[in-house]
Amino acid sequence: MLWGTFGAVHILSLLLAAGMIVGLYFILKGKSLRTQTLVLGILSFAGIAAIIYNLVTWGSPLEYLPLHLCSLNALVLPYAVFSRNKTANNLLLLWALGAVFALVVNTAQAEFEILSATFAFYYFPHVLELGIPILMFALGLVKKDPRCIASTLLITLAAYTVIHFINLGVNAYAAANQCLDWAGNVITVNYMYSLRPENPLLDLFWRIIPHPYFYMLLALPVATVYLLPVYLKEIIAACKARRSR
């Protein structure tokens, strides 16, 4: 059975993802801090397992470097859980959006067989990369801090900029050394989509600013608009506290 896009199987998989996250919350609610951290910490390595799986399975490591937003999330997630670092956990509230898009806008993965290892190593890590950052706050393991909005945006911009130059470097290396993909074409990578859009939302950005790297800067105001309601309760509380002084 194929996963499909917005068919019955795909929609059921999205509902299952939400159910797993909610179920984990109720399973861990009331458990000790040690138990909550241990369970979420173990589950947080699913993304790293997926990175290793892709690097090994497809025989083309240049095309599967952990440089998309979901992969960056996967690399940071174990540290965020075990350290309960405020900056890292608040950062993942934004980076978890990558997992949302990976699960919902799954057109490139629509042909995955749902009982295959390929599907499992794609679907479950993305569910956990979305769910664990949410659960860290829902279980009270870390607190939302609106002062982290600036660091979240700056870290994301810095990562995007570095990865853009990695894209240029990898593509230049692949062209110079005739590194070929499975179809016999010279490998070209587009991590974090810095060189060109690959979905309808990014196509809109490209129509406004049709230039590599710069078009994705339009994602920053979108991210800000997303983060403001996420932190709305904390922002209001901070404003009330200042007025009362």
Image (spheres, rainbow, N blue to C red):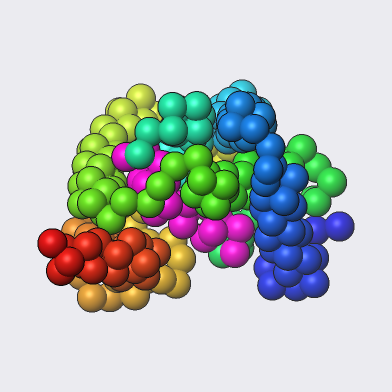
Residue sitting nearer the eye, 56 or 97: 97
Q: For the stretch drawn in magenta, what is the main secondary structure?
A: helix
Q: Which region of the structure is painted magenta? A: 87-104
Q: Residue furthest front?
A: 245
Please report the residue visible at 24 percent of the width from the left and 37 percent of the height from the top. Answer: 162
- Asked whether 55 falls inside the magenta stretch, the response is no
Quarter of the image where the N terminus is located: bottom right
Q: Position of residue 107 (x, y in %)?
A: 61, 63
Residue 208 vs residue 202: left or right? left
Q: Is residue 21 above or below residue 14?
A: above
Q: Quadrant of residue 55?
A: top right
Q: Position of residue 187 (x, y in %)?
A: 43, 38
Residue 12 vs residue 108: left or right? right
Residue sitting nearer the eye, 155 or 122: 155
Residue sitting nearer the eye, 196 or 103: 103
Q: Is residue 201 above or below residue 213?
A: below
Residue 67 visible within the image:
no
Q: How many marks?
A: 0
Quarter of the image where the C terminus is located: bottom left
Q: Position of residue 241 (x, y in %)?
A: 22, 62
Q: Position of residue 238 (x, y in %)?
A: 24, 61
Residue 224 vs residue 105: left or right? left
Please report the residue visible at 51 percent of the width from the left and 46 percent of the height from the top. Answer: 140
Residue sitting nearer the eye, 144 or 66: 144
- Asked whether 97 falls inside the magenta stretch, the response is yes
Please report the residue visible at 28 percent of the width from the left and 35 percent of the height from the top. Answer: 166
Q: Quadrant of residue 41?
A: top right
Q: Is residue 47 above or below residue 147?
A: above
